[in-house]
Amino acid sequence: MRKHLGYSHIPQCFAALVNAFCRDYLNPYINFHRPCLFAETITDAKGRQRKRYPYKLMMTPYEKLKSLPLAKQYLKPAISFKQLDAQAKEISDNEAAQRLNDARAILFKTIFNRSKAAA
């Protein structure tokens, strides 16, 4: 969260704007378009467990959810993989990142211009 919004204080009066940004841009980007590395645990001869992050386990959180056995049980009753697939394929990864950056710029402009005018 802080990686995308920064570490400066955001006044409480902007909480609704930040929540809307997260709901509409940040969460879909992270869940459907941004790849993550998932660990693979390897036990060596001495019994130590080591985490490895192979390239084959790099996928988005949504792809990881789909790869789980019995993944449908983790969905809410009104949601299907068909709906989520449509949402994931609606825009490209690069376009999602561009929309995120544009929305973040508008959000920061709104927050920091208003707070200076109010001070």
Image (cartoon, rainbow, N blue to C red):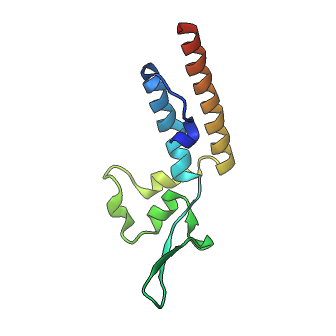
Residue nearest the observer in this picture, 91 or 39: 39
Residue nearest the observer in this picture, 46 or 27: 46
Q: Give the residue drawn at x 59%, y 19%.
A: 112
Q: Is 75 situated left or right of 85 in this image?
A: left
Indicate the position of residue 62 as horizontal and vertical percent values: 49, 57
Asked if 11 appears above or below 51 in the picture, the reply is above
Asked if 12 appears above or below 74 in the picture, the reply is above
Q: Give the residue drawn at x 48%, y 64%.
A: 64
Going by the picture, which residue comes out furthest to the bottom? 45
Q: Give the residue drawn at x 60%, y 32%.
A: 104
Indicate the position of residue 90 as horizontal and vertical percent values: 59, 47
Residue nearest the observer in this picture, 42 or 88: 42
Residue 98 seen in this snapshot:
yes
Looking at the rendered structure, the number of numbered marks drawn on it comes to: 0
Going by the picture, which residue comes out furthest to the front? 46
Asked if 42 appears above or below 80 in the picture, the reply is below
Residue 87 seen in this snapshot:
no
Q: Give the residue drawn at x 47%, y 68%.
A: 67
Indicate the position of residue 99 as horizontal and vertical percent values: 64, 37
Asked if 95 appears above or below 15 in the picture, the reply is below
Residue nearest the observer in this picture, 74 or 117: 117
Going by the picture, which residue comes out furthest to the top? 118
